[in-house]
Amino acid sequence: MPSFTGPGANPYWNSVGPYVSEPQKAPLLLLTDRGVQLETPRSYFQTAFTPNHAFYVRWHLDGIPSAVDLKEWRLHIEGNVAKPISFSLAELIRKFPAESIAAVNQCSGNSRSRLEPRVAGGQWGNGAMGNARWTGVRLRELLRAAAPKTGSLQIQFQGLDSGAGPEGYGSHFFLKSFDLANPVLDECVVAYAMNGEPLSMLNGFPVRLVVPGYFATYWMKSLTWIRVLDKTDDNFWMKTAYRIPDTPRGNTTPDDVKAGTVKMIPISRMPVRSFLISPDGDAKIPAGMPVQVRGIAFSGYGGVTKVDVSVDGLKTWQPARLGEDLGRYSFRTWEFTWKPKAPGRYTLAARASDSAGNAQPDEVVWNPGGYLWNRIERQDYFVGAAE
Ligand SMILES: Nc1nc2c(c(=O)[nH]1)N[C@H]1C(S)=C(S)[C@@H](COP(=O)(O)O)O[C@H]1N2
Ligand SMILES: [Mo]
């Protein structure tokens, strides 16, 4: 159980599950064990970069790699290309310039447990996200080396994992694809380092795809096959899973879904979010004491331009101080000095805006996948008399 996190503590910041230690990992919150899903506890978000050993974990299939022999392993670029080619890890490091980018990896279903009515899928709290500095090779360079032929439409990614997907869908490999014309491909990096260290097995050793600004479903782990396609990928993980309503905020209702009137499109960029990380509300705050309220914010649509904090239950807002700008796809830390004058119960909230002009709304969102939650978060505190 996570510790008590404030008056009412409803909902919990994190999911409610036992702590488990998997290889190369600190104790994390267990959602499911096959495929393994581990959530990062709130306290690890006090820094802009999430420590590798605390970075959340999500796999779909139960056959996940537990070791990779680098003498054998190669990254293959194949399919509708003039020059099928493959690289060892050493070649990826040696033959291409190293590219680094700070980028948030967030599961599409982060905060899914907030949805009402409840939807199927891992009941994540807020900890299915993390920020790292990723270092590797630009995807475009690898593609160029293989020389895609004319008539190429999409690019497909496959990792080393396999296993029975949902029955009847032939989905025994986790496969994700992009249109070759998607400009996000220019920003993609095939990363062999995460915060300056090799990736853990659970986070995709030896290399993973980094898709800055996009939800993590596209960030293929233990990436081993890059395939150029001359037709549209209609495998389960593209055609059926990870789809959102083509509506403002991806919002819809169970009735509209039942009626079959909702047009669904593939999920893509992450809406702007912010989180109040500390203090977590466990303790009573003495009245009159200045308290540093700290948090993080990010957006997949451009950098965070502003975080406002409310100390009166969302009635009035004051600007927070933003921390260092580590790049438009990174967590941006923020700070706010709060000096509660009188004892009582307070609701604080943070609201971020991004450079594309989006601000977090206070409305809930609902869709059948349980995606795109970005409502303004609240944190309650008790302030006690200090004399
Ligand atoms: N090979 C592979 N890559 C994958 C997945 C997977 O099941 N297999 N899941 C994706 C999804 S949905 C998420 S949320 C992220 C999780 O990344 P992490 O485990 O490094 O936090 O990996 C993505 N990449
Ligand atoms: Mo995910």
Image (cartoon, grey):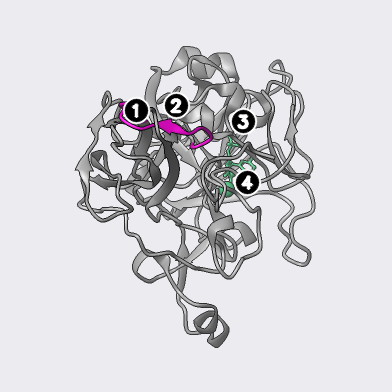
Whichever of callouts 1 and 4 sits on the residue coming sooner in the sequence is: 4
Q: Which numbered disc, 1 or 3, marks the residue closer to the eye? A: 1
Check disc 3 and give the amino acid type.
Answer: Asn
- In the displayed structure, would residue 69 be above or below residue 375? above
**Disc 1 packing (10 Å; few <14; some 14–19; many ≥20):** some
Residue 15: numbered disc: 4
- In the displayed structure, would residue 66 be above or below residue 183? above
Check disc 2 and give the amino acid type.
Answer: Gln
Q: Secondary structure at mark 4?
A: loop
**Disc 4 packing (10 Å; few <14; some 14–19; many ≥20):** many
**Disc 2 packing (10 Å; few <14; some 14–19; many ≥20):** some
Q: Which residue is mark 1?
A: 291
Ligand 1 image-quadrant field: top right
Disc 4 versus disc 3: distance between alpha carbons?
20 Å
The reply to whether the residue tagged 3 has its Cβ within 8 angstroms of ligand 1 is yes
Q: Which residue is mark 2?
A: 46
Whichever of callouts 4 and 2 sits on the residue coming sooner in the sequence is: 4
- In the displayed structure, would residue 369 be above or below residue 91? below
Quick check: can you spot residue 251? yes
- Relative to 324, is 143 on the left or the right? right
**Would you say the residues marked 4 and 3 are in contact, meaning their CB atoms lie under 8 Å apart?**
no
Check disc 4 and give the amino acid type.
Answer: Ser
Reply yes or no: does residue 282 show up in magenta.
Answer: yes
Disc 3 versus disc 2: distance between alpha carbons?
21 Å
Which segment is the magenta one? 281-293
Whichever of callouts 4 and 3 sits on the residue coming sooner in the sequence is: 4
